Amino acid sequence: MDSTDHHVQALQRVLEDSGVRKADIDGYMTVHADAFMGAVQFAEYLGINHRYVDGTMTGGSSFEFLVQHGATAIKDGLADTILITYGSDQLSRMGRMLGTGGFHRPGVKVPGPMQFEAPYGNSLVGAYAMAAQRHMHEFGTTSEQLAEIAVAVRGHAQLNPNAMYRDPITVDDVVNSRMIADPLHKLDCCVISDGGGAVLMTTAERARDLRQPPVYVLGAAGGETHWNISQMPNFTQTAAAQAGPEAFARAGVTPDDIDTIQFYDSFTITVLLLLEDLGFCKKGEGGEFVEGGTLKLGGELPLNTDGGGLSSCHPGMRGIFLLIEAARQLRGQGGEAQVPDAKLALACGSGGWLSCMGAVVLGSEHP
Amino acid sequence: MTGPAGVGDPTEGVVPPIKRPMPRPDTVSKKYWAAAAEGRLLFQECPKCGNRQLYPRGVCMACGETPEWREASGRGTVHTFTIIRQNYAQPFRGMLPYVVAMVELDEGPRLMSNVTDCAVEDVTVGMAVQAHFEPLDDAVGLPLFRPA
């Protein structure tokens, strides 16, 4: 399957799952890593006659931004039923080159902001590693604490037959895995996979008649601190510190109310920063917070119950899977990975190099 | 550069110089890269609000004024860093392991660079470093840092 096939499969499955007729879709949103006018291209291919379109590209958090925009568009009557699709054949096409394959060919002349970084040979993993290093320096966070995040997510992957890696791992396994960019080990890094998904957004009224129990967008917000990692103003704080409180305020809930979190786990440090920035613990206390199984099923705050990017799938921009897994949990369809009585979920995407954060509070009950 | 004539594979032992990815200087950055080619490290300061910044650009990030150039001492400290142990792209693959760091200049702004001339294990957050420069071509020099 190529990336287009993934978009098609996602569309067909979402129609079947929801009972929505394709002709009723009047809005379309997508982002694609390498398609010019991607939303327009894929709307044509899929045959979507839209009156509302959005292709806001913020990398891995794009789908959280799109949900924010889609909810506003539906509220304002710009569209009634919006389809979001995602598809990527990154692993099949490029292999595992995303993290350390190098951004640029030797000797190539690099324009724009990246001209100030490309000559130094940083890798994508290295960008996150610099945030982790600074966090360790400022707060004494340890590799073992970061490893707790990978271990929790792997535990959930064991319950997902579609997850890429399902063998159990321990903290020792993580800290003894090969160092890729200090202080991040191989098992601190997400997998690289193909994949796709779809989300349908519509009015609460229409949603009542569909095949699946509705999930409500209670509040959403996003923010950016930088694009290039060298421009990150504070290496231990992301834009989620701004987006989180805004999303919670719109939803009228607090972090204490959240039953499960679906966070962009590109790297273990990404999750740690999001936990702090979104207010689940104080800045600098993320390391202690994740100890003792907090993020495991049965713990205080189950994380990425599908196995996440660290163990299940990461096709390049996995923000859509955060929404899909949150919906599954809120519908009580989590199977063995179900968080008991999950009523509120927080999905938070991270795009770029900790650059652009989008938070969405989702609930099972009509607000 | 050619191999010894008539002995085995003529390309054996010949390593063509593989260059780092180069900056493509733009209307603003050409001054920055040219100064580095002369062994000088520049940063920008806003004449209106005093904000200091890198990378150099056509606008003050704080207030929108057009910034002015200042010459840095070249002294700074490592704000954060990583040791790159895997990178499939040349020439970096041949340089492994190496340090990519964010250096905070004594004047304030931060820039990405490499810390050279020491064991990678010796680099720490907060260590004092001093700029040196690697010429990439006539118009472009690359600011690097070594322990001060």
Image (cartoon, rainbow, N blue to C red):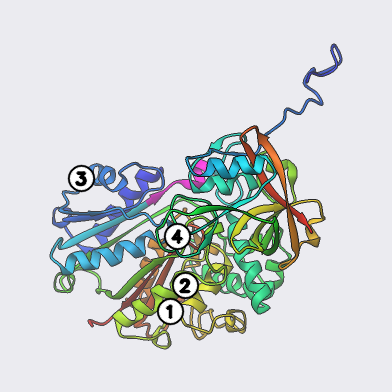
Q: The residue under label 2 is which amino acid type?
A: Thr
Residue span colored magenta: A87-94
Crowding at dot 1, Cα within 10 Å, few <14 / some 14-19 / many 20+, comes out as many
Q: CA distance from mark 4 to mark 3?
A: 43 Å
Which label's residue is closer to the chain start, 2 or 3?
3
Chain of the residue under the numbered disc 3 shown in the image: A
Q: Are marks 1 and 4 on the same chain?
A: no
Q: Position of residue A192 (x, y in %)?
A: 53, 53
Q: Examine the image and state in which quarter residue A248 appears.
A: bottom left
Q: CA distance from mark 2 to mark 3?
A: 33 Å
Q: The residue under label 4 is which amino acid type?
A: Met
Majority SS type along the magenta span: helix
Q: Position of residue B135 (x, y in %)?
A: 69, 38
Q: Which residue is mark 1?
A: A260
Q: Which residue is mark 2?
A: A305
Residue B80 drawn above or below residue A331: above
Farthest top residue?
Answer: B6
Counting every numbered tag in the picture gives 4
In this rendering, position of residue B109 left or right of residue A348: right
Residue A103 visible somewhere in the drawing: no
In this rendering, position of residue A147 left or right of residue A254: right
Q: Which residue is mark 3?
A: A47
Q: Which residue is mark 4?
A: B61
Residue A260 drawn above or below residue A192: below
Q: The residue under label 3 is which amino acid type?
A: Gly
Quadrant location of the N terminus of chain B?
top right
| Secondary structure category for the residue under label 2 | loop
Chain of the residue under the numbered disc 1 shown in the image: A
